Amino acid sequence: MAGLQFFWHMGPVILSSQSLMRIVGFNGREIKEGTCNRGSKKPVDDKKRPVPIRGPVSCDFIRDTLMSIAASTLEKMFNRGISILAEHKFFPKTIHALLDASQIESTEKCKGCGKVTKDKPPELKLRKKCIRRVLETVFGFKIWVVWDPNSRLPLSMRFTTIEVHDINLVQEVVQQAIDNLGEHAKISSLAIDRGFTDGIFLWWLNTENITFFIPAKANMNVYQDALYCIGTGNLCNRDKIRTIGAGKNKIAVTDHWSVEGLEDLTTAEF
């Protein structure tokens, strides 16, 4: 289901596939005729129009089943699944992981959701060349995910209401990823955004021998310090080919970067 773009694609993609549905315990007759006669309509002429394969269950059944599973049960199942993959050497020995927190907005009627009041984006505040501060209340949840960019599989997740700050559960989700991998793989580095810039968390990553990467703002002292140190580090060039346009107008463009690794920045105390 994770590879589908829309929820209703389960019908023709998954529920009608005999090879996939047999893995989860359905036989050929159940896949073709369903597990019951509810919702099945026979055509006018069975000889000319045979009954199409409709799958053993419906998309609504899977949706209701997933919604009835407790969050703690899903968390245990997910963590055990990652541990099994690590035991079978699915992940490389050294992982350069990514970490991000995303908001999942919902309606006010959603059970168990939280709410947070924040400013609207700047483009929505411009009116007659005057900037007005407009507040909006958003309902929903928030999820923290650590994932492997090579396999694109999450290594750990945390899920809570939307008003919880990003830094509150960041150490828990990274520690859970370390526990899931066990001795079979190790997180060598972690790329995070500026929302996780917290001294306690960064020092904890240092004690775990995890190198962290954070993009710096132009108004930060460490940014100016890095500009002054250009030419003293390890310099390398990187190229990446990407495409522009589509069809006959599709062309290939090569992007060039000059990357330099700097150490001993005095303005970064950690």
Image (cartoon, rainbow, N blue to C red):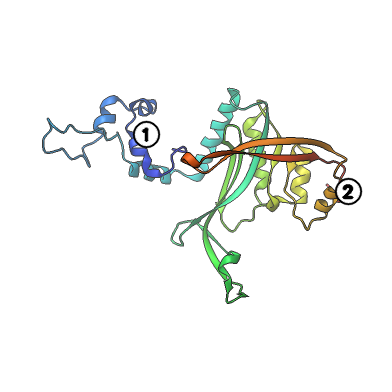
Left or right: where does residue 65 sit relative to residue 268? left
Q: Where 99 sits versus 25, above or below?
A: below
Residue 118 appears anywhere in the view? no
**Which badge, 2 or 1, is on the more N-terminal residue?**
1
Disc 2 vs disc 1: Cβ atoms closer than 8 Å?
no
Res. 75 image quadrant: top right
Residue 119, horizontal then vertical, whole percent: 60, 66
Q: Amino acid at mark 1?
A: Ile
Res. 21 image quadrant: top left
Q: Amino acid at mark 2?
A: Thr
Residue 200, horizontal then vertical, whole percent: 77, 49
Please state which of residues 126 and 173 is positioned toward the viewer in this rendering. Answer: 126
Q: Which mark is residue 179?
A: none
Residue drawn at x 37%, y 34% is 14
Left or right: where does residue 171 sit relative to residue 121? right
Q: Which residue is mark 1?
A: 14
Res. 120 image quadrant: bottom right
Left or right: where does residue 48 sit relative to residue 8? left
What is the crowding at mark 2: few (fewer than 14 residues within 10 Å), some, or many (at least 20)? few
Residue 53, horizontal then vertical, whole percent: 26, 32
Q: Where 153 sits versus 103, above or below?
A: above
Image quarter where the N terminus lies is top left
Q: What SS does tag 2 mark?
A: loop
Residue drawn at x 85%, y 44% is 230
Q: Which mark is residue 266?
A: 2
